[in-house]
Image (cartoon, rainbow, N blue to C red):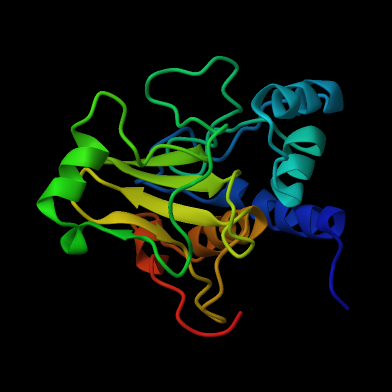
Amino acid sequence: MKMTVDERIRHIMKKAEGLAGKRNEFSCGEFPPKWKPPLSEQAVAAYEEKNGIRLPEDYRRFITTVASAGTQPFYGLQGLPVKRKDSDADVRKPFLYTVRSPLLLEEVLDEEYDRLFKAEEPGADTGYLFLCHEGCGMYSILIVNSEDRETYGTVWYYDLANDVGILPLLAPDTGSPMSFLDWLEYYVDRTLGLDERGFFSYGELAGVVTGDL
């Protein structure tokens, strides 16, 4: 039987307790994970109303019942931005890409590259929240505003610094786009399986959806 969102959160966090006994040389942020208190329902609703969006339900439930942010994965789960900074995406505008049509920089023409990344306001930075920074310009992002049903609520690999692009993370067992809880559970499972000098990147899951979902 399929777990509810709350059941799955409890399942993941129970497994995450095992991280307390791990020693990880390449954990980036403070390890084992430490979590900040959850946000109130009122604070999250106010954020949604202000930006004209509805946060994906699994992410929304996590930040209102478990933790608003944390010291992991990598450099830490980022909280909701209270005030938009220049480095934040504009969540009021839809995300430009879909799981079937992501941004692969090797396929972008020069004029399109200039339009996206050399303008005063980069055109690619809309419709998502930063989840965490892996380092070296590699991020995980959560799509919170999309006109495409398959794309909304999915987690993507964001790596423009190394000329990769912005691509959805695909579950290794199904090839389907990962949700927030898929992303979090993958981190827990992958980290539990590492030795103390081991490491991984979410980039290993970045791809393009081609089949039926």
Q: Is residue 62 shown above or below 71?
A: below
Residue 9 shows in this picture:
yes
Instruction: Report whether residue 39 is seen.
Output: no
Occupied quadrant, residue 108? bottom left
Residue 189 rendering spot, x and y as whole percentages? 57, 63
Above or below, comparing residue 40 to residue 97 in the picture: above
Q: Residue at coordinates 28% horizontally, 54% vertically from top-left? A: 165
Image quadrant containing the N terminus:
bottom right
Instruction: Judge left or right: residue 37 versus residue 19.
Output: right
Residue 199 sits in which quadrant?
A: bottom left
Rendered location of residue 85, percent (x, y): 44, 17
Locate residue 105 relative to residue 213 in the image: left or right: left
Is the residue 49 above or below the residue 10 in the image? above
Say which quadrant the C terminus sits in: bottom right
Q: Farthest left residue?
A: 110
Q: Name the spot of residue 167 as percent of width and height, x first.
A: 39, 59
State how many labels appear.
0
Q: Which residue is at a point 66% across and 56% down the rendered structure image? A: 181
Q: Nearer the viewer, residue 169 or 213?
A: 213
Picture quadrant where residue 173 is located: bottom right
Residue 136's spot in the image, x, y percent? 25, 41
Give whichever of 79, 110 is nearer the camera: 110
Q: Among all residues in the image, which is located at the extreme bottom?
A: 211
Asked whether, in this view, residue 45 is left or right of residue 31, the answer is right
